[in-house]
Amino acid sequence: MKVRLLAMVSASLILAGCAGSVKPDTVKAANGSSIEIYSVSAIPELNNNRVADSHLREVTPAHAAAGMGIAVVGALLGSINSSDFDKENYKGTTVETLENPTNNWFIPKAKQNITQWMNEKGNGHLYKQPLYIGKATWALIYKDANAATPLYQLKYKVLFYKRPESGNMFSAFTVAECTPTPVEAPLSDWNANNYKKVISETEKYMNSCLLELNNQLPRLLKQ
Protein backbone atom coordinates (compact mmCIF):
# COMPACT_ATOMS: atom_id res chain seq x y z
CA MET A 1 0.00 0.00 0.00
CA LYS A 2 1.36 3.39 -0.97
CA VAL A 3 -0.04 6.52 0.62
CA ARG A 4 1.14 9.99 -0.31
CA LEU A 5 0.15 13.02 1.76
CA LEU A 6 0.35 16.39 0.07
CA ALA A 7 0.11 19.44 2.26
CA MET A 8 0.13 22.10 -0.43
CA VAL A 9 -2.11 21.95 -3.48
CA SER A 10 -3.35 24.96 -5.42
CA ALA A 11 -7.05 25.59 -4.89
CA SER A 12 -7.43 26.61 -8.52
CA LEU A 13 -6.35 23.14 -9.63
CA ILE A 14 -8.98 21.48 -7.49
CA LEU A 15 -11.68 23.81 -8.71
CA ALA A 16 -10.77 22.87 -12.27
CA GLY A 17 -11.34 19.22 -11.41
CA CYS A 18 -14.74 19.56 -9.79
CA ALA A 19 -16.37 22.43 -11.63
CA GLY A 20 -19.37 22.00 -13.85
CA SER A 21 -22.37 19.77 -13.32
CA VAL A 22 -20.93 17.66 -10.47
CA LYS A 23 -23.15 17.93 -7.40
CA PRO A 24 -22.26 16.80 -3.88
CA ASP A 25 -24.02 14.26 -1.69
CA THR A 26 -24.53 15.23 1.94
CA VAL A 27 -23.53 12.60 4.49
CA LYS A 28 -25.19 12.97 7.90
CA ALA A 29 -24.50 11.37 11.27
CA ALA A 30 -26.98 10.68 14.07
CA ASN A 31 -25.29 13.29 16.29
CA GLY A 32 -25.95 16.06 13.76
CA SER A 33 -22.57 16.09 12.01
CA SER A 34 -22.70 16.43 8.24
CA ILE A 35 -20.35 16.91 5.30
CA GLU A 36 -20.70 17.23 1.53
CA ILE A 37 -18.93 14.58 -0.57
CA TYR A 38 -17.94 15.23 -4.18
CA SER A 39 -17.34 12.19 -6.42
CA VAL A 40 -14.99 13.41 -9.17
CA SER A 41 -12.28 12.41 -11.61
CA ALA A 42 -8.91 13.28 -10.10
CA ILE A 43 -7.38 16.25 -11.86
CA PRO A 44 -4.13 15.54 -13.75
CA GLU A 45 -2.05 17.72 -11.41
CA LEU A 46 -2.80 15.28 -8.59
CA ASN A 47 -2.49 12.20 -10.80
CA ASN A 48 1.09 12.49 -12.08
CA ASN A 49 -0.21 14.70 -14.90
CA ARG A 50 -2.35 11.81 -16.20
CA VAL A 51 -5.95 11.95 -17.29
CA ALA A 52 -8.14 9.89 -14.92
CA ASP A 53 -9.32 6.48 -16.15
CA SER A 54 -13.12 6.51 -16.44
CA HIS A 55 -12.99 2.95 -17.84
CA LEU A 56 -10.48 0.11 -17.70
CA ARG A 57 -7.41 0.90 -19.83
CA GLU A 58 -5.22 -1.80 -21.41
CA VAL A 59 -1.67 -0.89 -22.38
CA THR A 60 0.27 -3.49 -24.40
CA PRO A 61 3.83 -3.38 -25.79
CA ALA A 62 2.25 -2.67 -29.19
CA HIS A 63 0.91 0.65 -27.91
CA ALA A 64 4.38 1.77 -26.87
CA ALA A 65 6.03 0.53 -30.08
CA ALA A 66 3.51 2.34 -32.26
CA GLY A 67 3.47 5.50 -30.15
CA MET A 68 -0.32 5.31 -29.99
CA GLY A 69 -0.98 8.45 -27.96
CA ILE A 70 -0.31 9.36 -24.36
CA ALA A 71 -2.90 10.23 -21.72
CA VAL A 72 -1.24 13.27 -20.21
CA VAL A 73 -2.36 16.89 -20.18
CA GLY A 74 0.67 18.01 -22.17
CA ALA A 75 -0.49 15.91 -25.11
CA LEU A 76 -3.79 17.79 -25.14
CA LEU A 77 -2.02 21.14 -25.02
CA GLY A 78 0.64 20.25 -27.58
CA SER A 79 3.44 20.32 -25.01
CA ILE A 80 5.03 16.93 -24.29
CA ASN A 81 8.09 16.14 -22.20
CA SER A 82 10.37 13.15 -22.71
CA SER A 83 9.30 11.89 -19.28
CA ASP A 84 5.72 11.65 -20.57
CA PHE A 85 6.68 8.69 -22.76
CA ASP A 86 6.27 6.18 -19.96
CA LYS A 87 4.22 3.02 -20.45
CA GLU A 88 1.83 4.09 -17.70
CA ASN A 89 1.02 7.24 -19.66
CA TYR A 90 -0.08 5.55 -22.88
CA LYS A 91 -3.77 5.77 -23.71
CA GLY A 92 -3.80 2.13 -24.74
CA THR A 93 -7.20 0.60 -25.44
CA THR A 94 -10.29 1.55 -23.47
CA VAL A 95 -12.54 -1.33 -22.40
CA GLU A 96 -15.86 0.47 -22.82
CA THR A 97 -17.85 -2.28 -21.08
CA LEU A 98 -15.93 -1.83 -17.81
CA GLU A 99 -16.53 1.50 -16.08
CA ASN A 100 -14.20 2.52 -13.27
CA PRO A 101 -15.99 1.11 -10.18
CA THR A 102 -14.91 3.88 -7.80
CA ASN A 103 -18.19 5.80 -8.06
CA ASN A 104 -20.57 2.85 -7.89
CA TRP A 105 -18.69 0.46 -5.57
CA PHE A 106 -16.17 2.39 -3.50
CA ILE A 107 -17.88 5.69 -2.75
CA PRO A 108 -21.13 4.29 -1.24
CA LYS A 109 -19.03 2.25 1.19
CA ALA A 110 -16.77 5.23 1.85
CA LYS A 111 -19.83 7.28 2.81
CA GLN A 112 -20.83 4.59 5.32
CA ASN A 113 -17.34 4.74 6.86
CA ILE A 114 -17.49 8.53 7.02
CA THR A 115 -20.92 8.42 8.68
CA GLN A 116 -19.64 5.96 11.28
CA TRP A 117 -16.56 8.11 11.95
CA MET A 118 -18.67 11.25 12.41
CA ASN A 119 -21.05 9.37 14.72
CA GLU A 120 -18.09 8.54 16.95
CA LYS A 121 -15.91 11.64 16.58
CA GLY A 122 -17.86 14.31 14.72
CA ASN A 123 -19.22 16.00 17.86
CA GLY A 124 -22.18 17.32 15.89
CA HIS A 125 -19.89 19.43 13.69
CA LEU A 126 -21.34 20.80 10.46
CA TYR A 127 -18.43 20.76 8.04
CA LYS A 128 -18.10 23.89 5.95
CA GLN A 129 -15.56 22.42 3.53
CA PRO A 130 -16.46 19.40 1.36
CA LEU A 131 -14.45 16.21 0.95
CA TYR A 132 -13.47 15.18 -2.58
CA ILE A 133 -13.03 11.55 -3.61
CA GLY A 134 -11.36 11.31 -7.00
CA LYS A 135 -10.98 8.24 -9.17
CA ALA A 136 -7.55 8.28 -10.77
CA THR A 137 -6.00 5.12 -12.22
CA TRP A 138 -7.55 1.83 -13.33
CA ALA A 139 -5.42 0.05 -15.89
CA LEU A 140 -3.83 -3.19 -17.06
CA ILE A 141 -0.25 -2.35 -18.01
CA TYR A 142 2.42 -4.73 -19.31
CA LYS A 143 5.42 -5.24 -17.04
CA ASP A 144 8.21 -6.29 -19.44
CA ALA A 145 7.90 -5.71 -23.18
CA ASN A 146 10.75 -8.15 -23.90
CA ALA A 147 9.11 -11.13 -22.20
CA ALA A 148 7.75 -13.86 -24.49
CA THR A 149 4.48 -13.74 -22.57
CA PRO A 150 4.53 -10.47 -20.63
CA LEU A 151 2.81 -10.20 -17.29
CA TYR A 152 0.30 -7.41 -16.81
CA GLN A 153 -0.12 -5.38 -13.65
CA LEU A 154 -3.58 -4.27 -12.57
CA LYS A 155 -3.17 -0.73 -11.23
CA TYR A 156 -5.68 1.27 -9.20
CA LYS A 157 -5.52 4.63 -7.47
CA VAL A 158 -8.02 6.83 -5.65
CA LEU A 159 -7.48 10.25 -4.06
CA PHE A 160 -9.06 12.00 -1.06
CA TYR A 161 -8.69 15.75 -0.53
CA LYS A 162 -10.23 18.52 1.55
CA ARG A 163 -9.58 22.11 2.60
CA PRO A 164 -9.11 22.84 6.30
CA GLU A 165 -12.24 24.00 8.10
CA SER A 166 -10.65 27.35 8.87
CA GLY A 167 -9.65 27.85 5.24
CA ASN A 168 -11.26 29.43 2.20
CA MET A 169 -11.38 28.73 -1.54
CA PHE A 170 -7.71 29.70 -1.89
CA SER A 171 -6.47 27.51 0.97
CA ALA A 172 -4.18 24.55 0.36
CA PHE A 173 -5.58 21.05 0.46
CA THR A 174 -4.53 18.01 2.42
CA VAL A 175 -4.47 15.05 0.03
CA ALA A 176 -4.26 11.32 0.70
CA GLU A 177 -3.48 8.88 -2.12
CA CYS A 178 -4.28 5.16 -2.00
CA THR A 179 -2.34 3.01 -4.48
CA PRO A 180 -2.48 -0.72 -3.64
CA THR A 181 0.43 -2.94 -4.67
CA PRO A 182 -0.48 -4.21 -8.17
CA VAL A 183 -1.31 -7.87 -8.79
CA GLU A 184 0.42 -9.48 -11.80
CA ALA A 185 -0.93 -12.08 -14.25
CA PRO A 186 -0.89 -12.87 -18.00
CA LEU A 187 -3.31 -10.78 -20.04
CA SER A 188 -5.28 -13.90 -20.95
CA ASP A 189 -6.00 -14.48 -17.25
CA TRP A 190 -7.21 -10.91 -16.81
CA ASN A 191 -9.42 -11.06 -19.91
CA ALA A 192 -11.00 -14.45 -19.15
CA ASN A 193 -14.71 -14.68 -18.29
CA ASN A 194 -15.45 -11.04 -19.08
CA TYR A 195 -12.57 -9.74 -16.95
CA LYS A 196 -13.72 -11.62 -13.86
CA LYS A 197 -10.24 -11.49 -12.29
CA VAL A 198 -10.01 -7.73 -12.88
CA ILE A 199 -13.30 -7.18 -11.08
CA SER A 200 -12.46 -9.41 -8.11
CA GLU A 201 -8.94 -8.02 -7.62
CA THR A 202 -10.18 -4.44 -7.94
CA GLU A 203 -12.70 -5.06 -5.18
CA LYS A 204 -9.82 -6.23 -2.98
CA TYR A 205 -7.95 -3.03 -3.85
CA MET A 206 -10.96 -0.89 -2.96
CA ASN A 207 -11.45 -2.71 0.34
CA SER A 208 -7.86 -1.88 1.26
CA CYS A 209 -8.46 1.74 0.25
CA LEU A 210 -11.50 1.87 2.54
CA LEU A 211 -9.19 0.93 5.40
CA GLU A 212 -6.75 3.62 4.31
CA LEU A 213 -9.55 6.18 4.16
CA ASN A 214 -10.39 5.28 7.77
CA ASN A 215 -6.75 5.94 8.70
CA GLN A 216 -6.81 9.34 7.00
CA LEU A 217 -10.19 10.61 8.25
CA PRO A 218 -8.73 12.16 11.45
CA ARG A 219 -6.53 14.37 9.23
CA LEU A 220 -9.07 15.00 6.49
CA LEU A 221 -11.98 15.75 8.85
CA LYS A 222 -10.03 17.72 11.43
CA GLN A 223 -12.31 20.36 12.94
Image (tube, rainbow, N blue to C red):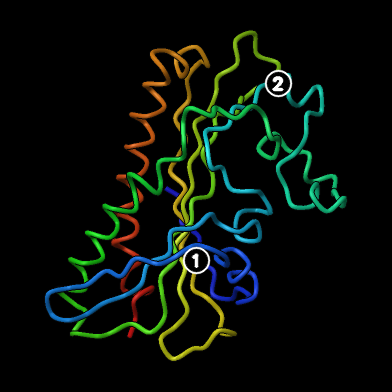
Q: Which residue is mark 2?
A: 61
Q: Which mark is residue 70?
A: none
Residue name at image x 69 percent, y 20 percent:
145
Instruction: Work out whether 149 lies above or below 14.
Output: above
Location of residue 110 by image quarter: bottom left
User: Residue lying farthest bottom?
Assistant: 166
In the picture as drawn, the residue positioned furthest to the front comes out as 21
* Residues packed near mark 2 inside 10 Å, few (<14), some (14 to 19) or many (20 plus): some
Give the image location of residue 96, x and y in percent: 54, 29
Which residue is rendered at x = 70% and y = 21% of the image? 61
Image point (46%, 63%), residue name: 176
**Residue lying farthest left?**
30
Question: Which residue type does callout 2 highlight?
Answer: Pro
Please state the horizontal and vertical placement of residue 4, each as a whole percent of the image.
50, 60
Q: Secondary structure beneath disc 1? A: strand
Q: What separation in Å lies between label 2 and label 1 (alpha carbons)?
A: 32 Å
The answer to whether residue 196 is left or right of residue 149 is: left
In the rendered image, residue 143, in percent from the top left (x then y), is placed at 61, 26
x then y, percent, for residue 118: 21, 73
Front residue of 154/37: it is: 37
* Residue furthest top in the image: 148
Q: Of tags 2 and 1, which is closer to the observer?
A: 2
According to the image, label 1 marks what residue? 5
Position of 170 relative to 39 (above/below)? below
Left or right of 118 on screen, residue 21: right
